[in-house]
Every structure is written in C-alpha cells, then in structure tokens.
Image (cartoon, rainbow, N blue to C red):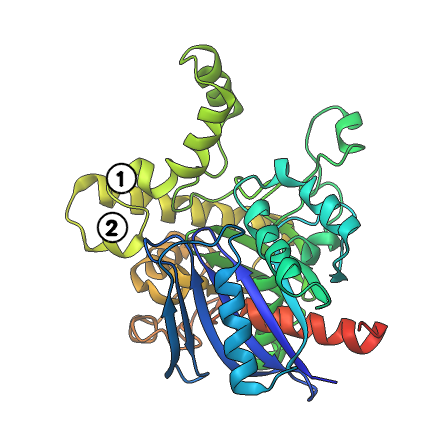
C-alpha cells in the first residue's frame, strides 16, 4: 500500500500542489508545483522541494472536462514514483459550513453538501470542487479527502460567531465561520515550536495576501477572526472590499440600479487594492508606484489591518504576540513596518534591520508585543490531516 498523498490547494487562478510521503510521523515533501489552466496555453510545472525544475508541460487548450492537467500530474507521479504511488488526494475546501469541523473522505453525498454551500463562498467553492470532480472522472477509485479552511474556527463561541440579526437566520446557519484556517493552524503550530513560552499567550496571526484575514488565538485555539459568513468580510484585500457598511450595498441596489450579480462582482473583483488605487491588486506594484492613488490604497490597507488587530486584541483582553504570514505578510517589509507603527500605542516596536531582512523575529528588545514573520504552509497542514484520517479511520 502506498504512503504517498497528493495535496491540491485551489486558488482563484491556479492550483498549487505538493506530493507528500506520509510513512513517517511528519509528512515529507517529495515535489511541489503549479497547475494553471487560466493561461492561453494551460501549463503544469513541477519542482523539487528545493525549487529545482523537474518537469513542465503545456496544452494547446483546456480539455472538455477541465481535467487534462490533472492527468498530466498523475502521469508524472506514476513515471517518477511508481505505477501505484498514491494513497489519496487531499483538497483544500474553503467552506465547510456548520457540519464539517475536521477532514472527511469525499463521497457523492459529501460533494453535494459542499456544493450547496457555494452561495457562502461563490468565488472559491466551485474552484475547490472542480478538481475533485475532474479526478473522480480520471481515477474513480482514488480516495479523495476534504480539508476545510473553516474547521480551525469551530472553536469560536458566542458572541464572536454571532450576527445581530433575527435568531431564526442563525438557526439556518447564518453566522460567522472564518477562513484561512489551514494557514492559521500551520502558523500556530510553528509558533509553538519557535517560541513555546508564547503558546498559551494572546496571539494574533495576520494572514496577508491577495485574500487577507486575522485570527485571534488563546491557548493556540481560534477565538475570533475577521472573516465571517463568507470570505468577503473583514480586511481590505487585493480585489475584495472587506467589511463594508451594508447601507452601501442597499445604495448600489436601489439608487445605482445595479443587479445582485453586478454588486457581487464589484465586491469580489473590483474593490480592495485594485478598486482604491485604480492601478493594481498586486501590493508589489502599488509599493513601487509613485501615484497618489497607489499610496492611498496602501495606507488604507495598513490602517484597516492595524484597526482590526486592535479589535482582535479586545477579544483577547490584550496582545502578547503578532505574527505576519502569507505573501504580503512574509515579503512586504513596508507593510509590516506601517502596521507595527500604527500599533505603537500597544507598546509594539520592531527592529528595522530584522524587519528589512524578514527574520523570524522582528521585534526589538523593548517591545511589549513579540512580533514574528512565519511562512505558512497550507499544503503541509492538509497532508497532516490526510495522514491522520488515513491512519485513524482506515481510509482505503
């Protein structure tokens, strides 16, 4: 029986993947790569754990079922690692709703229930489910496992997971769920390894990328987060508005005569950094720009992030540790500096050289708040969950 698990992490325009050996206690990465079906010629790139190019191929056009690149991945794995190398495929699923608080083997019934959650994550859920269906068509006997971005936040309790609307809607599942849980889980685990004295302290993790959210942790468990029912809430993001006065939505519908679909497209695709700047959703582009609108977009991003860190600190009753992660959090020193400066009233002080070098710990010796930069690894989290499910429940 194989001990290899393929992990697929579906994003908005591409799918990151990793192949892991789960024979040992800790999964070992064998190779990683990218599937991109949104280019003119869809491509597959495979690299070693060290980043060495192992394989690349392109297709002239997408297959009728959209599964041709998945077939290429399976063919590469079989050629390099043996004819029957896979025990299972693990998937990042953005929304698990109220029912799924841990990984689960995918069946037709589970897939149908996850598809029914699409209105809660219209941008993400269909993209998470498409690879499942494509692989089922190619390799129907292959075990597939769902791992949920919402699961880490199932530890949240009222009042943090509640909206101030009639209770009958909460009974139908309308509540705050939170997202980026696979990332928060990994970073919380790394923080406990790096600084065990902080494991039980009041911590906020800032997952800052094209999608962005914060998570407040006490004793390593999620007690609050900035995203809510959907991944649209909370922080300003690359193309998403984040939290917004609901009266704005009523105005757009009633006085701008926009349709619901037009409002949805505006909030998910035309807002955030790209909406405020009118230039780009890419933080790197905005930081390099001299345009006033670019600076204003960056300023709003850091203002909203610091504001929401303070909100998380209110939930925690104080703040002992702040961790930056994901693309912007890991690589944009200007953003880390600006957010930390806005939080100076909390006694937060960072070391300029440490921040410029993106060292693991960037606070200075006099900071009242420990500040870290910890790269995230959602694929590793998924591999761990798959291994635990396979070993604990005898998944075929």
- The crowd level at tag 2 (other Cα within 10 Å; few <14, some 14-19, many 20+) is many
Read off the residue under disc 1: 277
The image shows residue 351, relative to residue 264, as above or below, that is: below
- Of residue 319 and residue 296, the one placed in the foreground of this image is 296
Locate residue 181, reporting x and y percent: 62, 58
Of 241 and 315, which appears nearest the observer?
241
Residue at the (62%, 70%) spot, across then down: 381
For the residues bearing labels 1 and 2, Cβ distance under 8 angstroms:
yes
Q: Residue at x 51, y 17 (%)?
A: 250
Q: Is residue 164 left or right of residue 349?
A: right
Examine the rendered structure and indicate whether residue 82 appears above or below residue 140: below
Up-down relation of residue 288 to residue 174 (above or below): below
Residue 218, image quadrant = bottom right
Element under disc 1: helix
Precedes in sequence: disc 1 or disc 2: 1
| Drawn side of residue 2 relative to residue 34, left or right | right
* Residue 97 appears in the picture as rendered: no
Task: Name the residue rendered at 38%, 62% in the picture.
Answer: 59
In the rendered image, the vertical position of residue 3 relative to residue 254, given as above or below: below
* Residue 94 location (% of width, % of height): 61, 51
Q: Which residue is mark 2?
A: 286
Where does the C terminus fall, quadrant-wise? Answer: bottom right
In this view of the protein, which residue sits in the foreground, 349 or 279?
Answer: 279
- Structural crowding at the residue carrying mark 1, measured as other residues with C-alpha within 10 Å and reported as few (<14), some (14–19) or many (≥20): some
**Disc 1 to disc 2, C-alpha distance:** 8 Å
């Amino acid at each position: 029986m194989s001990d290899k698990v393929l992990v697929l992490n579906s994003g908005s325009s591409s799918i990151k993947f990793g192949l892991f050996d789960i024979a040992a206690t800790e999964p070992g990465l064998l190779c990683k790569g990218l599937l991109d079906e949104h280019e003119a010629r869809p491509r597959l790139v495979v690299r070693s754990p060290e980043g060495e190019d192992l394989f690349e191929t392109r297709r002239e056009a997408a297959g009728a079922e959209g599964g041709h690149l998945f077939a290429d991945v399976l063919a590469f794995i079989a050629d390099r690692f043996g004819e029957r190398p896979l025990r299972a495929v693990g998937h990042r699923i953005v929304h698990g709703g109220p029912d799924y608080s841990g990984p689960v083997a995918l069946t037709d019934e589970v897939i149908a229930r996850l598809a029914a959650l699409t209105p809660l994550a219209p941008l993400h859920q269909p993209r998470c489910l498409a690879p499942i269906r494509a692989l089922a068509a190619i390799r129907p006997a292959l075990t597939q496992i769902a791992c949920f971005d919402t699961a880490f936040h199932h530890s949240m309790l009222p009042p943090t997971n509640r909206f101030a609307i009639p209770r009958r809607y909460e009974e139908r599942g309308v509540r705050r769920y939170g997202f980026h849980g696979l990332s928060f889980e990994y970073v919380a685990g790394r923080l406990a390894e790096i600084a065990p004295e902080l494991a039980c302290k009041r911590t906020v993790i800032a997952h800052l990328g094209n999608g962005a959210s914060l998570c407040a942790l006490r004793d390593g468990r999620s007690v609050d987060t900035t995203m809510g029912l959907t991944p649209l809430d909370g922080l300003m993001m690359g193309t998403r508005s984040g939290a917004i006065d609901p009266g704005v939505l009523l105005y757009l519908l009633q006085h701008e005569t926009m349709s619901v679909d037009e409002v949805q497209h505006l909030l998910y695709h035309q807002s955030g950094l790209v909406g405020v700047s009118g230039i780009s959703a890419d933080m790197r582009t905005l930081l390099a720009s001299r345009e006033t609108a670019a600076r204003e977009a960056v300023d709003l991003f850091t203002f909203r992030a610091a504001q929401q860190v303070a909100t998380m600190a209110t939930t925690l009753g104080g703040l002992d540790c702040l961790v930056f992660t994901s693309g912007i959090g890991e690589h944009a020193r200007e953003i880390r500096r600006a957010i930390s400066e806005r939080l100076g009233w909390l006694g937060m002080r960072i070391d300029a050289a440490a921040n410029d070098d993106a060292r693991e710990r960037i606070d200075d010796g006099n900071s009242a708040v420990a500040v870290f930069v910890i790269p995230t690894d959602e694929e590793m989290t998924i591999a761990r969950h798959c291994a635990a499910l396979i070993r604990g429940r005898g998944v075929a």
